[in-house]
Amino acid sequence: MNFLRWLSLLLTAAITIGVDAKTYDTIPGHSCFRSMGGMMESMSDLADDNPDLMTMTVIGESYLKNNNGRTNGQYDIPTSGHDIYVLKITDSNSPLQSNKKGKVLMTAGLHAREYAPPELLARFVEKLVNGHNEDAELTSIMQRTELHAILYVNPDGRWMAEKYPDLMWRKNLNPNGGCGDGNYGVDINRNFDFAWGDLNGASNNPCDSDYHGRSPESEPETKALADYSKQLFPSGQRKNDPWGKRNDPFGEDNVGIYADIHASGGYVYYPWGHEDSQSPDDEALQALGRKINSFNGYKLWAGGQPDFVYPATGDASDYEYAVMGVASMGFEIGDAFYQNCNRFESQVVPENMPALVYTAKIAQAPFKEVKGPDILNPSVNYVNGNIEVSATASDGAMVNAIGGRFSDFRTGDQNIAQVQLYVDVHPDDYGQGDTSFAMQQARRRLVSKKDCGDITGKKRCKRTDQCEWFTQKKKCGSKNASSGSTGGNTGSNQQKPPQKPEVSPVVPSQQNTAVEFNSGEENVQLTIDPNSLSAGRRTLYIQATDSDGYKGPVYSMFVNVPQRRRESALRGARVP
Protein backbone atom coordinates (compact mmCIF):
# COMPACT_ATOMS: atom_id res chain seq x y z
CA MET A 1 0.00 0.00 0.00
CA ASN A 2 1.48 3.38 -0.97
CA PHE A 3 1.90 6.12 1.60
CA LEU A 4 -0.88 8.38 0.31
CA ARG A 5 -3.38 5.51 0.33
CA TRP A 6 -2.33 4.57 3.87
CA LEU A 7 -2.64 8.18 5.02
CA SER A 8 -6.10 8.48 3.45
CA LEU A 9 -7.34 5.40 5.29
CA LEU A 10 -5.87 6.63 8.54
CA LEU A 11 -7.60 10.01 8.25
CA THR A 12 -10.89 8.36 7.31
CA ALA A 13 -10.72 6.16 10.39
CA ALA A 14 -9.98 9.16 12.57
CA ILE A 15 -13.00 11.04 11.21
CA THR A 16 -15.25 8.01 11.66
CA ILE A 17 -14.58 7.67 15.37
CA GLY A 18 -14.08 11.35 16.03
CA VAL A 19 -10.57 10.91 17.44
CA ASP A 20 -7.71 12.89 15.97
CA ALA A 21 -4.21 12.88 17.42
CA LYS A 22 -5.51 12.65 20.98
CA THR A 23 -6.35 9.26 22.40
CA TYR A 24 -8.83 8.54 25.18
CA ASP A 25 -8.95 5.98 27.93
CA THR A 26 -10.54 2.66 26.97
CA ILE A 27 -11.98 -0.27 28.90
CA PRO A 28 -9.25 -2.82 29.68
CA GLY A 29 -9.44 -5.72 27.26
CA HIS A 30 -11.85 -3.82 25.01
CA SER A 31 -9.83 -1.25 23.11
CA CYS A 32 -12.75 -0.36 20.84
CA PHE A 33 -14.81 0.95 23.77
CA ARG A 34 -13.90 4.17 25.50
CA SER A 35 -14.25 4.03 29.24
CA MET A 36 -16.92 6.28 30.70
CA GLY A 37 -14.23 8.77 31.74
CA GLY A 38 -12.54 8.65 28.35
CA MET A 39 -15.89 8.91 26.59
CA MET A 40 -17.04 12.00 28.44
CA GLU A 41 -13.65 13.63 27.89
CA SER A 42 -13.86 12.95 24.15
CA MET A 43 -17.42 14.31 23.98
CA SER A 44 -16.38 17.43 25.85
CA ASP A 45 -13.53 17.97 23.40
CA LEU A 46 -15.85 17.46 20.43
CA ALA A 47 -18.31 20.00 21.82
CA ASP A 48 -15.53 22.50 22.51
CA ASP A 49 -14.27 22.13 18.94
CA ASN A 50 -17.76 22.48 17.44
CA PRO A 51 -19.75 24.90 19.61
CA ASP A 52 -22.26 25.64 16.82
CA LEU A 53 -23.01 21.95 16.32
CA MET A 54 -22.93 20.35 19.76
CA THR A 55 -23.57 21.16 23.42
CA MET A 56 -23.38 19.17 26.66
CA THR A 57 -25.87 19.80 29.45
CA VAL A 58 -26.42 18.21 32.85
CA ILE A 59 -30.02 16.97 33.15
CA GLY A 60 -29.85 15.05 36.41
CA GLU A 61 -27.76 13.31 39.03
CA SER A 62 -27.16 9.64 39.75
CA TYR A 63 -28.18 7.93 42.98
CA LEU A 64 -24.69 8.21 44.50
CA LYS A 65 -24.52 11.92 43.78
CA ASN A 66 -26.72 12.48 46.84
CA ASN A 67 -26.21 9.25 48.79
CA ASN A 68 -23.26 7.63 50.51
CA GLY A 69 -21.08 5.02 48.91
CA ARG A 70 -19.43 2.33 50.94
CA THR A 71 -16.13 0.62 51.61
CA ASN A 72 -15.91 -3.06 52.43
CA GLY A 73 -12.46 -3.83 51.12
CA GLN A 74 -13.65 -5.80 48.09
CA TYR A 75 -16.16 -3.77 46.09
CA ASP A 76 -15.57 -0.21 47.24
CA ILE A 77 -18.04 2.37 45.94
CA PRO A 78 -17.25 6.11 45.94
CA THR A 79 -19.66 8.65 47.37
CA SER A 80 -19.21 11.27 44.64
CA GLY A 81 -21.68 9.85 42.11
CA HIS A 82 -22.12 11.23 38.61
CA ASP A 83 -23.92 13.88 36.63
CA ILE A 84 -26.18 12.70 33.81
CA TYR A 85 -25.44 14.53 30.56
CA VAL A 86 -27.40 15.03 27.38
CA LEU A 87 -25.60 15.88 24.14
CA LYS A 88 -27.54 18.11 21.77
CA ILE A 89 -26.38 17.84 18.17
CA THR A 90 -27.75 20.20 15.54
CA ASP A 91 -26.66 23.05 13.29
CA SER A 92 -27.55 26.04 15.45
CA ASN A 93 -26.91 28.38 12.52
CA SER A 94 -29.40 26.76 10.14
CA PRO A 95 -32.37 28.92 9.11
CA LEU A 96 -34.82 26.47 10.68
CA GLN A 97 -35.59 27.41 14.26
CA SER A 98 -35.45 24.84 17.05
CA ASN A 99 -39.23 24.65 17.46
CA LYS A 100 -39.53 23.64 13.79
CA LYS A 101 -36.87 20.93 13.84
CA GLY A 102 -37.52 17.24 14.25
CA LYS A 103 -36.57 15.90 17.67
CA VAL A 104 -34.76 12.62 18.18
CA LEU A 105 -33.96 11.28 21.66
CA MET A 106 -31.49 8.39 21.75
CA THR A 107 -30.31 6.72 24.91
CA ALA A 108 -27.80 4.09 25.95
CA GLY A 109 -26.37 2.76 29.17
CA LEU A 110 -29.62 2.04 31.02
CA HIS A 111 -28.14 -1.39 31.71
CA ALA A 112 -24.61 -0.89 32.93
CA ARG A 113 -22.96 -4.09 31.73
CA GLU A 114 -23.78 -3.51 28.08
CA TYR A 115 -20.48 -2.09 26.87
CA ALA A 116 -21.25 -1.49 23.21
CA PRO A 117 -24.37 0.77 23.18
CA PRO A 118 -22.74 4.00 24.48
CA GLU A 119 -19.87 3.59 22.02
CA LEU A 120 -22.22 3.06 19.08
CA LEU A 121 -24.29 6.10 20.03
CA ALA A 122 -21.17 8.21 20.51
CA ARG A 123 -19.92 7.23 17.07
CA PHE A 124 -23.23 8.31 15.60
CA VAL A 125 -22.82 11.66 17.34
CA GLU A 126 -19.32 11.98 15.90
CA LYS A 127 -20.53 10.94 12.46
CA LEU A 128 -23.09 13.75 12.42
CA VAL A 129 -20.72 16.42 13.71
CA ASN A 130 -17.78 15.43 11.50
CA GLY A 131 -20.00 14.89 8.46
CA HIS A 132 -21.64 18.31 8.63
CA ASN A 133 -20.99 20.26 5.45
CA GLU A 134 -19.15 17.24 4.00
CA ASP A 135 -21.97 14.72 3.48
CA ALA A 136 -25.30 15.98 2.16
CA GLU A 137 -27.43 13.46 4.07
CA LEU A 138 -25.76 14.26 7.39
CA THR A 139 -25.80 17.98 6.69
CA SER A 140 -29.52 17.88 6.03
CA ILE A 141 -30.12 16.03 9.30
CA MET A 142 -28.05 18.58 11.18
CA GLN A 143 -29.94 21.47 9.59
CA ARG A 144 -33.44 20.06 10.15
CA THR A 145 -33.20 17.80 13.17
CA GLU A 146 -31.99 17.90 16.75
CA LEU A 147 -30.41 14.75 18.11
CA HIS A 148 -30.50 14.56 21.90
CA ALA A 149 -28.21 11.74 23.04
CA ILE A 150 -27.78 10.42 26.58
CA LEU A 151 -24.84 8.03 26.50
CA TYR A 152 -25.08 6.90 30.12
CA VAL A 153 -28.53 7.03 31.68
CA ASN A 154 -27.14 4.90 34.53
CA PRO A 155 -23.61 6.24 35.11
CA ASP A 156 -23.17 4.80 38.63
CA GLY A 157 -23.92 1.34 37.32
CA ARG A 158 -21.57 1.86 34.37
CA TRP A 159 -18.77 2.82 36.75
CA MET A 160 -19.41 -0.45 38.62
CA ALA A 161 -19.48 -2.54 35.42
CA GLU A 162 -16.13 -1.13 34.29
CA LYS A 163 -14.47 -1.24 37.73
CA TYR A 164 -15.65 -4.74 38.64
CA PRO A 165 -16.44 -6.55 35.38
CA ASP A 166 -16.76 -9.91 37.11
CA LEU A 167 -20.03 -8.69 38.70
CA MET A 168 -21.70 -8.14 35.30
CA TRP A 169 -23.49 -5.16 36.85
CA ARG A 170 -26.89 -4.25 35.35
CA LYS A 171 -28.83 -2.01 37.76
CA ASN A 172 -28.15 1.30 39.47
CA LEU A 173 -26.47 1.47 42.90
CA ASN A 174 -29.44 2.04 45.17
CA PRO A 175 -28.74 -0.52 47.96
CA ASN A 176 -32.32 -0.93 49.15
CA GLY A 177 -33.44 -4.45 49.93
CA GLY A 178 -30.40 -5.73 51.81
CA CYS A 179 -29.06 -7.74 48.87
CA GLY A 180 -25.53 -9.03 48.41
CA ASP A 181 -22.68 -7.32 46.57
CA GLY A 182 -23.76 -8.46 43.12
CA ASN A 183 -27.52 -8.20 43.43
CA TYR A 184 -28.75 -4.87 44.80
CA GLY A 185 -30.00 -1.88 42.85
CA VAL A 186 -33.02 -0.98 40.71
CA ASP A 187 -33.43 -1.88 37.04
CA ILE A 188 -33.83 1.55 35.45
CA ASN A 189 -35.57 -0.04 32.47
CA ARG A 190 -38.38 -1.37 34.67
CA ASN A 191 -38.88 1.87 36.63
CA PHE A 192 -40.81 4.08 34.18
CA ASP A 193 -44.37 5.20 34.81
CA PHE A 194 -46.22 3.05 32.31
CA ALA A 195 -47.23 -0.53 33.10
CA TRP A 196 -45.03 -0.18 36.17
CA GLY A 197 -45.37 -2.93 38.75
CA ASP A 198 -46.82 -5.52 36.37
CA LEU A 199 -45.03 -8.64 37.54
CA ASN A 200 -45.41 -10.30 34.14
CA GLY A 201 -42.47 -8.20 32.98
CA ALA A 202 -40.60 -7.15 36.14
CA SER A 203 -39.86 -8.31 39.68
CA ASN A 204 -40.75 -6.95 43.10
CA ASN A 205 -37.74 -8.72 44.64
CA PRO A 206 -34.96 -6.14 45.21
CA CYS A 207 -32.33 -8.80 44.60
CA ASP A 208 -33.58 -9.76 41.14
CA SER A 209 -31.96 -8.29 38.03
CA ASP A 210 -35.27 -6.80 36.82
CA TYR A 211 -36.39 -5.28 40.14
CA HIS A 212 -38.81 -2.44 39.35
CA GLY A 213 -38.08 -0.21 42.35
CA ARG A 214 -40.30 1.01 45.16
CA SER A 215 -42.48 3.21 42.94
CA PRO A 216 -42.63 4.60 39.37
CA GLU A 217 -39.67 6.92 38.73
CA SER A 218 -38.34 6.24 42.22
CA GLU A 219 -34.79 6.42 40.87
CA PRO A 220 -33.12 9.72 40.00
CA GLU A 221 -31.79 8.26 36.75
CA THR A 222 -35.29 7.33 35.59
CA LYS A 223 -36.67 10.69 36.61
CA ALA A 224 -33.91 12.56 34.78
CA LEU A 225 -34.81 10.84 31.49
CA ALA A 226 -38.57 11.18 32.02
CA ASP A 227 -38.34 14.86 32.91
CA TYR A 228 -36.10 15.61 29.94
CA SER A 229 -38.53 13.83 27.61
CA LYS A 230 -41.35 16.03 28.91
CA GLN A 231 -39.29 19.13 28.11
CA LEU A 232 -38.29 17.90 24.66
CA PHE A 233 -41.49 16.53 23.16
CA PRO A 234 -44.70 18.59 22.71
CA SER A 235 -47.18 18.30 25.57
CA GLY A 236 -50.11 18.84 23.20
CA GLN A 237 -49.66 15.43 21.55
CA ARG A 238 -49.95 13.42 24.79
CA LYS A 239 -52.94 11.58 26.21
CA ASN A 240 -54.38 12.73 29.52
CA ASP A 241 -54.71 9.11 30.67
CA PRO A 242 -51.98 7.06 28.96
CA TRP A 243 -52.92 3.74 30.53
CA GLY A 244 -56.66 4.18 30.22
CA LYS A 245 -56.36 5.26 26.59
CA ARG A 246 -53.56 2.89 25.62
CA ASN A 247 -55.72 1.31 22.92
CA ASP A 248 -56.46 4.65 21.22
CA PRO A 249 -54.15 5.49 18.31
CA PHE A 250 -52.20 8.73 18.34
CA GLY A 251 -52.68 9.24 14.63
CA GLU A 252 -50.14 10.43 12.09
CA ASP A 253 -49.53 14.05 13.10
CA ASN A 254 -47.42 13.38 16.21
CA VAL A 255 -43.77 14.31 15.98
CA GLY A 256 -40.55 13.04 17.52
CA ILE A 257 -38.83 9.70 17.80
CA TYR A 258 -37.15 7.80 20.62
CA ALA A 259 -34.54 5.05 20.23
CA ASP A 260 -32.98 3.12 23.11
CA ILE A 261 -29.82 1.10 22.43
CA HIS A 262 -29.15 -2.11 24.37
CA ALA A 263 -27.16 -5.34 24.01
CA SER A 264 -27.50 -8.03 22.96
CA GLY A 265 -29.20 -10.59 20.73
CA GLY A 266 -29.88 -8.92 17.39
CA TYR A 267 -33.39 -7.52 17.88
CA VAL A 268 -35.23 -4.36 17.00
CA TYR A 269 -38.15 -3.79 19.32
CA TYR A 270 -41.10 -1.41 19.43
CA PRO A 271 -44.41 -1.16 21.35
CA TRP A 272 -45.95 -3.01 22.74
CA GLY A 273 -43.29 -4.51 24.94
CA HIS A 274 -45.25 -4.88 28.16
CA GLU A 275 -47.52 -7.49 26.59
CA ASP A 276 -47.67 -9.63 23.49
CA SER A 277 -50.17 -7.53 21.55
CA GLN A 278 -50.01 -4.90 18.84
CA SER A 279 -50.17 -1.22 19.70
CA PRO A 280 -52.92 0.93 18.13
CA ASP A 281 -50.26 2.54 15.91
CA ASP A 282 -48.75 -0.76 14.84
CA GLU A 283 -48.97 0.07 11.14
CA ALA A 284 -46.39 2.84 11.51
CA LEU A 285 -44.29 1.23 14.26
CA GLN A 286 -44.10 -2.13 12.51
CA ALA A 287 -43.16 -0.39 9.26
CA LEU A 288 -40.37 1.34 11.19
CA GLY A 289 -39.17 -1.92 12.73
CA ARG A 290 -39.21 -3.65 9.36
CA LYS A 291 -37.26 -0.86 7.69
CA ILE A 292 -34.64 -0.93 10.44
CA ASN A 293 -34.42 -4.67 9.83
CA SER A 294 -33.52 -3.93 6.20
CA PHE A 295 -30.27 -2.40 7.47
CA ASN A 296 -29.23 -4.77 10.24
CA GLY A 297 -31.25 -7.94 9.71
CA TYR A 298 -32.46 -7.94 13.31
CA LYS A 299 -35.52 -9.87 14.44
CA LEU A 300 -38.67 -8.02 15.45
CA TRP A 301 -39.28 -8.18 19.19
CA ALA A 302 -42.73 -6.64 19.49
CA GLY A 303 -46.27 -7.54 20.42
CA GLY A 304 -47.91 -9.79 17.85
CA GLN A 305 -44.59 -10.88 16.28
CA PRO A 306 -43.24 -14.45 16.26
CA ASP A 307 -39.98 -13.28 17.87
CA PHE A 308 -41.58 -11.63 20.89
CA VAL A 309 -39.25 -13.02 23.57
CA TYR A 310 -40.75 -11.88 26.87
CA PRO A 311 -42.66 -8.87 28.24
CA ALA A 312 -40.85 -5.92 29.82
CA THR A 313 -43.03 -3.70 32.00
CA GLY A 314 -42.15 -0.18 33.07
CA ASP A 315 -39.57 0.10 30.28
CA ALA A 316 -38.47 3.25 28.46
CA SER A 317 -39.71 2.31 24.99
CA ASP A 318 -43.34 1.76 25.96
CA TYR A 319 -43.20 4.85 28.18
CA GLU A 320 -41.96 7.17 25.44
CA TYR A 321 -44.66 5.98 23.04
CA ALA A 322 -47.59 5.71 25.44
CA VAL A 323 -46.88 8.80 27.58
CA MET A 324 -44.88 11.12 25.28
CA GLY A 325 -46.71 10.15 22.09
CA VAL A 326 -43.59 9.67 19.98
CA ALA A 327 -42.59 6.88 17.65
CA SER A 328 -40.52 4.60 19.85
CA MET A 329 -38.15 1.74 19.26
CA GLY A 330 -35.02 0.07 20.53
CA PHE A 331 -32.02 -1.96 19.41
CA GLU A 332 -30.47 -5.07 20.96
CA ILE A 333 -27.09 -4.94 19.24
CA GLY A 334 -24.38 -7.56 18.96
CA ASP A 335 -24.16 -10.93 20.66
CA ALA A 336 -22.65 -10.26 24.11
CA PHE A 337 -22.74 -7.79 27.00
CA TYR A 338 -18.95 -7.41 26.81
CA GLN A 339 -18.90 -7.35 23.02
CA ASN A 340 -15.91 -8.65 21.08
CA CYS A 341 -14.20 -5.73 19.33
CA ASN A 342 -13.74 -7.52 16.02
CA ARG A 343 -17.46 -8.15 15.70
CA PHE A 344 -18.29 -4.67 16.93
CA GLU A 345 -16.14 -3.03 14.27
CA SER A 346 -16.94 -5.38 11.39
CA GLN A 347 -20.66 -5.95 11.97
CA VAL A 348 -22.35 -3.98 14.74
CA VAL A 349 -21.21 -0.53 13.61
CA PRO A 350 -21.68 -0.89 9.83
CA GLU A 351 -25.03 -2.67 10.26
CA ASN A 352 -26.52 -0.13 12.62
CA MET A 353 -25.06 3.23 11.61
CA PRO A 354 -27.30 3.53 8.52
CA ALA A 355 -30.27 2.51 10.69
CA LEU A 356 -29.55 5.37 13.09
CA VAL A 357 -29.26 7.80 10.18
CA TYR A 358 -32.62 6.63 8.84
CA THR A 359 -34.20 6.99 12.28
CA ALA A 360 -33.01 10.59 12.57
CA LYS A 361 -34.23 11.48 9.08
CA ILE A 362 -37.89 10.78 9.82
CA ALA A 363 -38.14 12.54 13.19
CA GLN A 364 -40.33 15.41 11.99
CA ALA A 365 -43.17 13.16 10.83
CA PRO A 366 -42.29 9.56 11.76
CA PHE A 367 -45.82 8.13 11.73
CA LYS A 368 -46.28 9.39 8.15
CA GLU A 369 -42.90 9.26 6.45
CA VAL A 370 -42.20 5.67 7.44
CA LYS A 371 -45.26 4.64 5.39
CA GLY A 372 -44.01 6.40 2.26
CA PRO A 373 -41.66 5.18 -0.49
CA ASP A 374 -37.91 5.20 0.01
CA ILE A 375 -35.21 6.53 -2.29
CA LEU A 376 -32.64 3.83 -3.02
CA ASN A 377 -29.33 3.83 -4.90
CA PRO A 378 -29.31 7.54 -5.75
CA SER A 379 -26.46 8.84 -7.86
CA VAL A 380 -25.45 12.02 -9.61
CA ASN A 381 -22.96 12.11 -12.49
CA TYR A 382 -21.82 14.35 -15.27
CA VAL A 383 -22.61 12.72 -18.62
CA ASN A 384 -21.75 14.56 -21.85
CA GLY A 385 -21.55 17.79 -19.88
CA ASN A 386 -25.02 17.45 -18.33
CA ILE A 387 -25.95 16.53 -14.78
CA GLU A 388 -27.62 13.13 -14.71
CA VAL A 389 -29.46 12.10 -11.56
CA SER A 390 -30.82 8.60 -11.09
CA ALA A 391 -32.46 6.67 -8.26
CA THR A 392 -34.93 3.95 -7.43
CA ALA A 393 -38.15 4.87 -5.65
CA SER A 394 -39.63 1.87 -3.86
CA ASP A 395 -42.69 1.56 -1.66
CA GLY A 396 -41.94 -1.99 -0.60
CA ALA A 397 -38.24 -2.85 -0.88
CA MET A 398 -37.26 -1.83 2.65
CA VAL A 399 -40.46 -2.66 4.51
CA ASN A 400 -40.62 -6.12 2.93
CA ALA A 401 -36.91 -6.95 3.05
CA ILE A 402 -37.45 -9.08 6.15
CA GLY A 403 -39.05 -11.87 4.06
CA GLY A 404 -39.11 -15.40 5.46
CA ARG A 405 -42.13 -15.93 7.72
CA PHE A 406 -43.36 -12.42 7.02
CA SER A 407 -45.77 -11.57 4.26
CA ASP A 408 -45.58 -8.25 2.41
CA PHE A 409 -46.69 -5.39 4.61
CA ARG A 410 -49.66 -3.20 3.80
CA THR A 411 -47.69 0.07 3.83
CA GLY A 412 -45.54 -1.22 0.96
CA ASP A 413 -48.11 -2.26 -1.61
CA GLN A 414 -48.89 1.12 -3.22
CA ASN A 415 -47.71 2.32 -6.61
CA ILE A 416 -45.27 5.16 -6.97
CA ALA A 417 -47.20 8.29 -7.86
CA GLN A 418 -44.45 10.89 -8.15
CA VAL A 419 -40.72 11.36 -7.68
CA GLN A 420 -39.67 14.97 -7.34
CA LEU A 421 -36.20 16.53 -7.33
CA TYR A 422 -35.63 19.89 -5.65
CA VAL A 423 -32.63 22.16 -6.09
CA ASP A 424 -31.35 24.00 -3.02
CA VAL A 425 -34.67 23.79 -1.22
CA HIS A 426 -35.96 21.04 1.04
CA PRO A 427 -39.41 19.78 -0.03
CA ASP A 428 -40.91 20.94 3.27
CA ASP A 429 -39.75 24.51 2.48
CA TYR A 430 -40.63 24.55 -1.21
CA GLY A 431 -42.44 27.68 -2.35
CA GLN A 432 -43.08 29.98 -5.26
CA GLY A 433 -39.94 30.71 -7.24
CA ASP A 434 -38.09 27.60 -6.04
CA THR A 435 -36.76 25.00 -8.46
CA SER A 436 -38.03 21.44 -8.72
CA PHE A 437 -38.34 18.77 -11.40
CA ALA A 438 -40.50 15.70 -11.80
CA MET A 439 -38.15 12.77 -12.35
CA GLN A 440 -38.95 10.48 -15.25
CA GLN A 441 -38.86 6.74 -15.78
CA ALA A 442 -35.26 5.75 -16.34
CA ARG A 443 -33.92 4.85 -19.72
CA ARG A 444 -31.46 2.01 -20.01
CA ARG A 445 -29.01 0.89 -22.64
CA LEU A 446 -30.04 -2.49 -24.02
CA VAL A 447 -28.39 -4.70 -26.61
CA SER A 448 -30.69 -5.00 -29.59
CA LYS A 449 -29.45 -8.48 -30.61
CA LYS A 450 -29.21 -10.07 -27.17
CA ASP A 451 -31.73 -11.37 -24.67
CA CYS A 452 -31.26 -9.41 -21.46
CA GLY A 453 -33.69 -11.40 -19.37
CA ASP A 454 -31.08 -12.93 -17.09
CA ILE A 455 -28.57 -11.26 -14.78
CA THR A 456 -25.64 -11.83 -17.13
CA GLY A 457 -27.58 -10.30 -20.00
CA LYS A 458 -28.55 -7.27 -17.97
CA LYS A 459 -24.94 -6.63 -17.03
CA ARG A 460 -23.95 -6.96 -20.70
CA CYS A 461 -26.72 -4.53 -21.67
CA LYS A 462 -25.37 -1.93 -19.29
CA ARG A 463 -21.76 -2.09 -20.39
CA THR A 464 -22.04 -2.34 -24.17
CA ASP A 465 -22.32 0.51 -26.60
CA GLN A 466 -24.13 -1.64 -29.18
CA CYS A 467 -27.50 -0.65 -27.83
CA GLU A 468 -30.73 1.27 -28.10
CA TRP A 469 -32.61 3.28 -25.51
CA PHE A 470 -36.06 2.71 -24.15
CA THR A 471 -37.78 2.82 -20.80
CA GLN A 472 -37.10 -0.19 -18.64
CA LYS A 473 -40.79 -1.06 -18.71
CA LYS A 474 -39.98 -2.66 -22.09
CA LYS A 475 -38.63 -6.18 -22.21
CA CYS A 476 -35.25 -6.53 -23.77
CA GLY A 477 -35.28 -8.67 -26.87
CA SER A 478 -39.05 -8.72 -27.24
CA LYS A 479 -40.94 -7.63 -30.34
CA ASN A 480 -42.16 -4.52 -28.56
CA ALA A 481 -38.79 -3.64 -27.10
CA SER A 482 -38.11 -0.90 -29.62
CA SER A 483 -41.56 0.63 -29.52
CA GLY A 484 -41.14 4.37 -29.37
CA SER A 485 -37.37 4.19 -29.83
CA THR A 486 -35.04 4.50 -32.77
CA GLY A 487 -32.92 1.82 -34.33
CA GLY A 488 -34.67 -1.03 -32.52
CA ASN A 489 -35.89 -4.52 -33.27
CA THR A 490 -39.22 -4.15 -35.07
CA GLY A 491 -39.88 -7.87 -35.24
CA SER A 492 -37.87 -8.53 -38.41
CA ASN A 493 -34.33 -9.84 -38.55
CA GLN A 494 -32.99 -6.67 -40.07
CA GLN A 495 -31.19 -4.45 -37.55
CA LYS A 496 -30.71 -0.72 -37.89
CA PRO A 497 -27.46 0.84 -36.75
CA PRO A 498 -27.53 1.72 -33.06
CA GLN A 499 -28.17 5.36 -32.32
CA LYS A 500 -27.62 7.49 -29.27
CA PRO A 501 -30.72 8.56 -27.38
CA GLU A 502 -32.08 12.00 -27.85
CA VAL A 503 -32.32 13.09 -24.23
CA SER A 504 -32.88 16.80 -23.83
CA PRO A 505 -31.61 18.30 -20.57
CA VAL A 506 -34.21 20.22 -18.61
CA VAL A 507 -33.81 23.72 -17.24
CA PRO A 508 -35.67 25.38 -14.37
CA SER A 509 -38.17 27.04 -16.72
CA GLN A 510 -39.25 23.57 -17.85
CA GLN A 511 -41.08 22.31 -14.75
CA ASN A 512 -41.70 18.76 -15.88
CA THR A 513 -45.18 17.31 -15.73
CA ALA A 514 -45.33 14.28 -13.43
CA VAL A 515 -45.11 11.00 -15.31
CA GLU A 516 -47.61 8.21 -14.77
CA PHE A 517 -46.02 5.31 -12.93
CA ASN A 518 -47.73 1.94 -12.59
CA SER A 519 -45.73 -0.08 -10.09
CA GLY A 520 -44.50 0.07 -6.51
CA GLU A 521 -40.86 0.35 -7.57
CA GLU A 522 -39.61 2.68 -10.27
CA ASN A 523 -36.16 3.51 -11.56
CA VAL A 524 -36.09 7.22 -12.32
CA GLN A 525 -33.70 9.70 -13.84
CA LEU A 526 -33.36 13.34 -14.72
CA THR A 527 -30.87 15.15 -16.94
CA ILE A 528 -30.23 18.79 -16.08
CA ASP A 529 -28.36 21.43 -18.04
CA PRO A 530 -25.75 22.70 -15.53
CA ASN A 531 -25.75 26.09 -17.29
CA SER A 532 -29.26 26.60 -15.96
CA LEU A 533 -28.01 26.42 -12.36
CA SER A 534 -25.88 28.83 -10.39
CA ALA A 535 -22.23 27.87 -10.16
CA GLY A 536 -20.99 26.31 -6.93
CA ARG A 537 -22.10 23.46 -4.75
CA ARG A 538 -25.80 22.77 -5.07
CA THR A 539 -27.90 20.52 -2.85
CA LEU A 540 -30.34 18.14 -4.53
CA TYR A 541 -33.26 16.67 -2.59
CA ILE A 542 -35.30 13.71 -3.86
CA GLN A 543 -38.65 12.62 -2.44
CA ALA A 544 -41.15 10.04 -3.66
CA THR A 545 -44.90 9.91 -3.08
CA ASP A 546 -47.05 6.79 -3.28
CA SER A 547 -50.56 6.39 -4.64
CA ASP A 548 -52.04 6.77 -1.15
CA GLY A 549 -50.44 10.20 -0.87
CA TYR A 550 -47.70 9.25 1.59
CA LYS A 551 -44.44 11.11 1.07
CA GLY A 552 -41.34 9.15 2.03
CA PRO A 553 -38.06 10.27 3.58
CA VAL A 554 -36.07 12.86 1.67
CA TYR A 555 -32.69 11.91 0.24
CA SER A 556 -30.05 14.64 -0.11
CA MET A 557 -26.88 14.89 -2.17
CA PHE A 558 -24.39 17.52 -3.27
CA VAL A 559 -23.42 18.37 -6.84
CA ASN A 560 -20.75 20.84 -7.91
CA VAL A 561 -21.76 23.08 -10.79
CA PRO A 562 -18.81 24.60 -12.69
CA GLN A 563 -18.56 28.21 -13.77
CA ARG A 564 -18.94 27.19 -17.38
CA ARG A 565 -19.51 23.97 -19.27
CA ARG A 566 -16.36 22.05 -20.12
CA GLU A 567 -17.69 18.90 -21.70
CA SER A 568 -14.35 17.36 -22.53
CA ALA A 569 -13.27 17.53 -18.90
CA LEU A 570 -16.58 16.57 -17.32
CA ARG A 571 -17.90 13.86 -19.62
CA GLY A 572 -18.42 10.63 -17.72
CA ALA A 573 -16.74 11.86 -14.55
CA ARG A 574 -18.46 11.16 -11.26
CA VAL A 575 -19.46 14.27 -9.40
CA PRO A 576 -17.17 14.91 -6.41
Image (cartoon, rainbow, N blue to C red):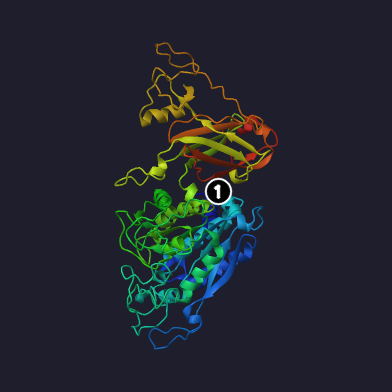
Q: Is residue 298 above or below residue 30?
A: above
Which residue is depicted at the point 49% across and 67% down?
Answer: 151
Label 1 amino acid? Answer: Glu
x, y percent for residue 385: 62, 30
Q: Is residue 543 above or below residue 384?
A: below
Q: How many marks?
A: 1
x, y percent for residue 485: 49, 19
Q: Name the residue tied to disc 1.
A: 137
x, y percent for residue 265: 34, 60
Residue 14 seen by the camera: no
The quadrant the C terminus occupies is: top right
In depth, the one of 311 and 207 nearer the eye is 311
In depth, the one of 166 and 542 nearer the eye is 542
x, y percent for residue 256: 52, 57
List the single residue furthest toward the bottom: 72
> As drawn, is 311 to the left or to the right of 47?
left
Residue 171 seen by the camera: yes
Q: Is residue 506 above or below residue 576?
A: above
In depth, the one of 560 and 174 nearer the eye is 174
In which quadrant of the rendered view does residue 115 lie? bottom left
Q: Is residue 497 above or below residue 228?
A: above
Which residue is depicted at the point 39% across and 88% down?
Answer: 73
> As drawn, is 41 to the left or to the right of 196?
right
Which residue is depicted at the point 43% across and 87% down?
Answer: 70
> Regarding mark 1 in the picture, which secondary structure is present there?
helix
The residue carrying pointer 1 sits among few (fewer than 14), some (14 to 19) or many (20 or more) residues within 10 Å by Cα, namely many
In which quadrant of the rendered view does residue 507 lie? top right
